[in-house]
Image (cartoon, helix red, strand yellow):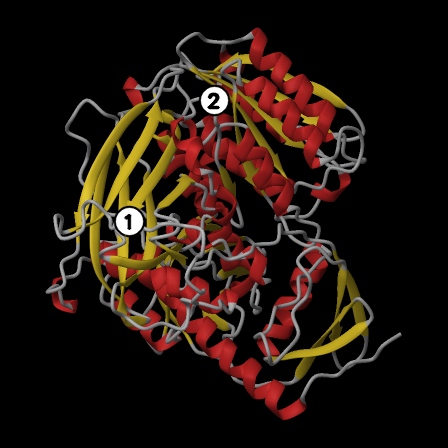
């Protein structure tokens, strides 16, 4: 007994000694010019090299040895700040833009060498760090007409020219080509039908490019996903339906002669304790391409956050795949968090990628542990680089479409850069009755897997479709902004066999239509000669209705096969001015306009960064998590970057060295 007491005493003395040799420091990091939070800034303590990342509120907290003497705060495009540590445990750091331009980035794509941009001295060090850690770096797209952009699916490489050497890093990221939806005449095509999209991967991926000092390729910019990254203050459903529709219409900021229709969809929020039991399978890519710090290590940290949300009635299995697939953890109760986290800690990256075999095994495990009336879901975490086995998008799609009929849904979490396969990941999530998020840092993981836990994992309505009918006596032409890969045929709306999008607990969905009213001249509306063999009839509702359009929505219960219909009409409020427009309307318009500028859209019209910033500044709202403030900082950074690109392009032109 005496020996046991001695051991216990020694243990507590050791723990106490260890705790006494550590301290926790915290701080707030802002941009000195405008006071905005510097979300994503790197914080490192010296000489221990303990590190963390600033969260969306601009704050950080870090446990460090008491022997550390300083912290270094760095962010692409800003001067690194070295703060000497004192007895204080809380610090306020203001970052200053670094405008020195010393080095160049040259992109080689399909035999063409293009001078892209100049890097600041601080930016160069950050880029060098990215290259060392990630072994890949995606070159920024530049502005159409000034600097040629890379093909969305082309292989490319980037050269970093420093004082001593040149490094070449290959890039094989791929994005599905987007063909923007143009204006359609209401008298020829009165119906517009599309599936909802709650995915938000495009925004965090675009943010990654901008935070790394470049502009994204235009096909990485899916405007509806950028708009839907943010929550909006919509009323909760009060009727028996699990969703509620809200609408607002006002002048379009980028063309006041046009109208902008804002459609909001709010799903009912179900408290965590009332959510059904979950049968989850973590399907984890542990191939060699996942070895970088922003891939498997970040993935493991992300799933640990999710594990902390699980309850006793939930269960989790872990399937891994590389050269072959295997079961890393059999189905385990959600309250056995130690066993789940230990299994995650044992994961190592290596080998090629048998994605198809991994999916097959994951569905087998999910089916064996199926919970009737529960949430049965595979969570696929990968960079999407499937290169062995059942690897084609079509094969994956067929497998997932077949398995979703059994009630097992699929959520996709994307990680990394350089070889990132966005096109494949989006396809898998769309066909698997699930959602798709891109995790670029631990803060984003917390947003998706903790803050939005219910919305990410628990479906309250499936196969959700919109159909709008426009009144040609009020509407000359219209266009849906974004949702290009979610368009449906008119007859698909009433076809319950047609798959559509899902919406989770507490989720919001936002869609925007730009409308050209009758009587407005527009360059976007062409003309044709009168038809010879067609008879035209006056619309029966002409002069009998002030309705601009009717909105219809169909949805199914999560375990249902028959859809239910909701509909409402919209009357244009032509007297509405800027002062009476909601923050929901203005902020969504700012994000959409930002997306059009990044895409260099044919329909951007009078769009400009100044207006984006002004709209966002005036519509931050409560912003308790700081996401809208982060967008404002991102817009300001992009505005500076775009100006720099134009300056460099105008000064130097475009270099083309054909091989």
Residue 654's quadrant in the figure? bottom right
Q: Residue at x 44, y 49 (%)?
A: 225
Residue 483 shown left or right of residue 626 in the figure: right
Residue 567 shown left or right of residue 150 in the figure: left
Residue 381 at what x, y percent from top left? 59, 35
Residue 400 at what x, y percent from top left? 60, 24
Q: Is residue 72 something that shows in the picture?
A: no
Q: CA distance from mark 1 to mark 2?
A: 34 Å
Q: Nearer the viewer, residue 539 or 403?
A: 539
Residue 186 at what x, y percent from top left? 34, 53
Classify mark 2: helix, strand or loop.
Answer: loop
Residue matched to label 1: 537
On residue 497, which mark appears? 2
Residue 624 sits above or below residue 354 on the image: below
Residue 186 sits above or below residue 491 on the image: below
Q: Residue at x 51, y 37 (%)?
A: 302
Classify mark 1: helix, strand or loop.
Answer: loop
Q: Residues within 10 Å of mark 2 (few under 14, many from 20)?
A: few
């Amino acid at each position: 007994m005496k020996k046991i007491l001695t051991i216990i005493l020694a243990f507590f003395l050791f723990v106490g000694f260890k705790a006494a040799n550590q301290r926790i420091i915290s701080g707030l990091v802002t941009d000195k010019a405008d006071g905005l939070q510097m979300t994503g800034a790197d914080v490192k303590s010296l000489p221990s090299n303990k590190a963390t990342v600033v969260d969306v509120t601009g704050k950080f907290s870090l446990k460090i040895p008491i022997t550390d003497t300083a912290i270094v705060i760095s962010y692409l495009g800003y001067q690194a700040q070295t703060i000497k540590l004192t007895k204080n445990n809380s610090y306020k750091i203001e970052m200053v833009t670094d405008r020195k331009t010393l080095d160049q980035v040259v992109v080689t794509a399909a035999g063409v060498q293009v001078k892209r941009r100049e890097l600041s001295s601080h930016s160069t060090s950050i880029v060098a760090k990215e290259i060392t850690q990630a072994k890949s770096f995606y070159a920024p797209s530049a502005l159409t007409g000034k600097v040629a952009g890379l093909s969305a699916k082309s292989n490319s490489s980037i050269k970093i020219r420093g004082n001593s050497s040149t490094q070449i890093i290959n890039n094989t990221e791929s994005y599905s080509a987007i063909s923007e939806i143009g204006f359609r005449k209401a008298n020829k095509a009165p119906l517009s039908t599309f599936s909802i999209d709650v995915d938000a991967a495009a925004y965090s991926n675009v943010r990654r490019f901008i935070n790394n000092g470049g502009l994204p390729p235009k096909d990485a910019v899916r405007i509806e996903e950028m708009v839907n990254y943010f929550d909006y203050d919509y009323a909760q459903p009060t009727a028996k339906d699990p969703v509620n529709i809200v609408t607002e219409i006002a002048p379009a900021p980028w063309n006041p002669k046009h109208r902008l229709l804002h459609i909001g969809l709010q799903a009912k929020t179900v408290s965590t304790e009332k959510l059904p039991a979950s049968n989850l399978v973590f399907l984890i890519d542990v191939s060699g391409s996942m070895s970088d710090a922003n891939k498997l290590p970040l993935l493991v940290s992300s799933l640990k956050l999710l594990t902390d949300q699980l309850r006793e009635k939930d269960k989790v299995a872990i399937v891994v795949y590389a050269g072959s697939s295997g079961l890393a953890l059999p189905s385990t109760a959600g309250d056995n968090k130690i066993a789940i986290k230990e299994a995650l800690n044992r994961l190592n990256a290596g080998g090629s990628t048998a994605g198809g075999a991994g999916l097959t095994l994951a569905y087998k495990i999910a089916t064996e542990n199926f919970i009737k009336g529960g949430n049965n879901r595979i969570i696929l975490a990968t960079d999407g680089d499937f290169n062995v086995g059942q690897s084609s998008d079509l094969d994956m799609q067929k497998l997932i479409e077949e398995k979703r009929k059994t009630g097992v849904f699929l959520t996709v979490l994307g990680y990394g850069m350089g070889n990132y396969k966005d096109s494949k990941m989006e396809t898998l999530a769309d066909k698997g009755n699930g959602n798709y998020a891109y995790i670029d840092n631990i803060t984003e993981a917390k947003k998706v897997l903790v803050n939005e836990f219910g919305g990410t994992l628990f479906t309250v309505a499936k196969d959700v479709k919109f159909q709008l009918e426009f009144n040609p006596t009020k509407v000359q032409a219209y266009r849906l902004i974004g949702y290009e890969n979610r368009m449906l045929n008119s007859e698909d709306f009433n076809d319950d066999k047609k798959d559509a999008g899902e919406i989770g607990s507490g989720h919001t969905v936002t869609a925007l239509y730009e409308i050209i009213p009758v009587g407005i001249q527009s360059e976007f509306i062409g003309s044709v000669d009168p038809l010879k063999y067609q008879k035209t009839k006056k619309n029966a509702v002409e002069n009998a209705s002030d309705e601009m359009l009717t909105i219809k929505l169909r949805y199914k219960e999560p375990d249902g096969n028959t859809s239910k219909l909701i509909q409402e009409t919209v009357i244009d409020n032509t007297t509405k001015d800027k002062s009476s427009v909601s923050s929901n309307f203005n902020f969504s318009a700012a994000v959409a306009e930002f997306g059009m500028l990044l895409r260099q859209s044919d329909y951007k019209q009078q769009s400009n960064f100044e207006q984006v910033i002004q709209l966002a500044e005036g519509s931050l709202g409560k912003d308790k998590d700081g996401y809208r403030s982060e967008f404002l900082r991102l817009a300001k950074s992009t505005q500076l970057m775009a100006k720099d690109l134009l300056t460099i392009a105008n000064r130097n032109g475009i270099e083309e060295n054909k091989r």
